Amino acid sequence: MERAQPAIRSTSRAVKGPTAAPALSEKPPVELVYVFPLRGWPRTLADSAEAIAFIESFDESKPERPFTRYEVDVRYSNGNEVRGQFNDKLAAVAFLRSIR
């Protein structure tokens, strides 16, 4: 960890000027959220609120197949994507709430 800190400080010093702060703080709108409970059919949802509702209502205890994890892909309007794999509802919902 100690070696990473100088690199981070060095990078942050390189980003200067009035346009740097807004570019780093602005978040593009979420284009779609893709939730795949690994034991069922994938769902493509419009936003994090729909994804949270889906995950909270998903019944992990159904005996069809054993539940493995949730995979969540978030696509932003600028083309960036964030992907996460979560072993339980709480972690998946916490992630989605953090991107609102």
Image (cartoon, rainbow, N blue to C red):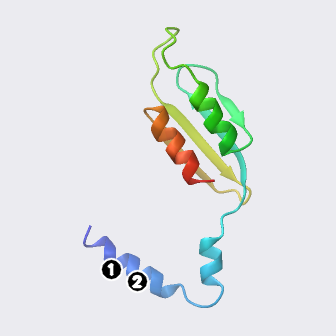
**Residue 79 screen position, x and y as percent:** 70, 56
Tell me which amino acid carries mark 1.
Pro
Above or below residue 23? Residue 83 is above
Above or below residue 12? Residue 61 is above
**Residue 89 screen position, x and y as percent:** 49, 33
> Could you tell me which residue is drawn at 66 percent across and 70 percent down?
26
Q: Is residue 74 left or right of residue 1?
A: right
> Could you tell me which residue is drawn at 60 percent across and 25 percent down?
57
Q: Quadrant of residue 68?
A: top left
Q: Which label number is shown at residue 14? A: none
Q: Nearer the viewer, residue 60 or 9?
A: 60
Secondary structure found at label 1: helix
Q: Quadrant of residue 51?
A: top right
Rendered-image quadrant of the N terminus: bottom left
Above or below residue 83? Residue 60 is above
**Residue 72 screen position, x and y as percent:** 57, 39
Real-space Cα distance between discs 1 and 2?
6 Å
Q: Nearer the viewer, residue 92 or 7?
A: 92
Q: Which residue is mark 2?
A: 10
Residue farthest top in this picture: 63
Count of residue discs = 2
Crowding near the residue tagged with mark 2, few <14, some 14–19, many ≥20 C-alpha atoms within 10 Å = few
Q: Which label number is shown at residue 6? A: 1
> Could you tell me which residue is drawn at 70 percent across and 34 percent down?
44
**Residue 71 screen position, x and y as percent:** 54, 35
Q: Is residue 6 left or right of residue 92?
A: left
Above or below residue 66? Residue 70 is below
Tell me which amino acid carries mark 2.
Ser
